[in-house]
Structures are given as C-alpha cells and as structure tokens.
Amino acid sequence: MDKIKRRSALAIFLITGFITGFLTGAAAVGTLASYRIDSYHARIRELEISLEDRDVQLEKLKESINKSRFVLKDIEIVLEYDGDEIDRMTIEKHIKNKYRNLLGKEVRNIDTDILIEVIDKRIFKLEEREYSLKVNRLVLAEILKLWISAEEKS
C-alpha cells in the first residue's frame, strides 16, 4: 500500500512539473515574441515616416529643380524627449508636417522668426497626453534644422 502511495505521489509531482515547465516555457516564448513584434512595429513605423518625408521632399524638389537658387531641401528635427520611441516619432512627424510647405522655397525669403513661432510654446496632444514644445535652436540653410524639447504635461 505504501508503494502505491509513493508511486501516485511521484506521478503527481511529475505531471505537476511538466505542466509548470510547459506554462513557464509558453510564457517565456510569448514574452520574447511580443518584444520582437513591438520592435518590428516600431521599425516599420519609423520607415513609413521616413518614406513619407522622402516623397514630400522629392515632390518639392521636382517643383523647384528648374530654378537655380538656394532652396530648402530638407527638414531635420532634433527632439529632446525622454519617452516612448513611438511617441517621439509621432511628435517629430507632427512637427515636420507644420514645416512641409516650406520645402522647395527659396531660403532667403523664409523668415526665421515666424519659423520659431510655428512650434515654440505650443501644446501638442497625442492620444490623451499633452506635450509642451519649445524651440531651443534653429539653423536655416538648405536643411532646416530645429532643436526642440518636448515635455509631457501632467
């Protein structure tokens, strides 16, 4: 009788061990897969935004190609933000959209004070969060380069 109890206890421990191992392994694989999917999603979003920017640049440059003058060819944003990477890309895209109509325009006809006022001290809403944007520095040449800090408002 004692051997039967030991065998049934051993079988229960063995089955419990297999089930625990299976569930732990499934959780580990699920975590790894979700991490990779999230990183691929962020990379895809980054590439989509880059592609959209390049398409707009190409269109604006084609419009001004026959004119031999100093024109704005690109917009570059240096965003100081300590948050989620997807939020960072969305904020950068929003800022670039504000300046897109300047691509292909002659640089000497662009007023830098107005460029700063477009974004400086603005509130940007993303989903249910608000971000305060501040222009720290601006360089205007063939590439408009803006250094902007974004802080999430509480």
Image (spheres, rainbow, N blue to C red):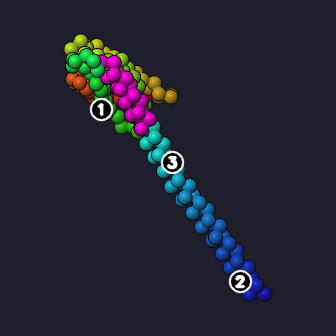
- The magenta segment is 46-64
Q: Residues within 10 Å of mark 2 (few under 14, many from 20)?
A: few
The residue pinned by badge 3 equals 37
- Quadrant location of residue 113? top left
As measured in the structure, the alpha-carbon distance from the residue carrying label 1 to the one carrying label 2 is: 68 Å
Q: Is residue 145 left or right of residue 30?
A: left
- Do the CB atoms of the residues marked 1 and 2 lie less than 8 Å apart? no
- In the picture, measured across the screen, residue 11 lies left or right of residue 122, that is right
Q: Indicate the secondary structure of the residue bearing disc 2.
A: helix
Dots 1, 3 in contact, CB < 8 A:
no
Please name whichever residue, 63 or 41, is drawn nearer the observer in this view of the structure. Answer: 63
Q: Which of the two residues, 106 or 137, is positioned nearer the viewer here?
A: 106
Question: Please, what is the three-letter code of the amino acid marked with disc 2?
Answer: Arg
Who comes first in sequence, dot 1 or dot 2? 2
State the quadrant of the N terminus.
bottom right
Can you say whether 71 is above or below 4 in the image? above
Q: Is residue 60 magenta?
A: yes
**Residue denoted by label 1:** 78
Location of the C terminus by quadrant is top left
The amino acid beneath tag 1 is Val
**Helix or strand or loop: what does disc 1 sit on?**
strand
Mark 3 is surrounded, within 10 Å at the Cα level, by few (under 14), some (14 to 19) or many (20 or more) other residues, namely few
Q: Is residue 117 above or below residue 10?
A: above
Residue 45 picture location, percent across and down: 45, 37
Majority secondary structure in the magenta region: helix
Instruction: Please name the residue that numbered disc 2 is placed on.
Output: 6
Q: Residue furthest right?
A: 1
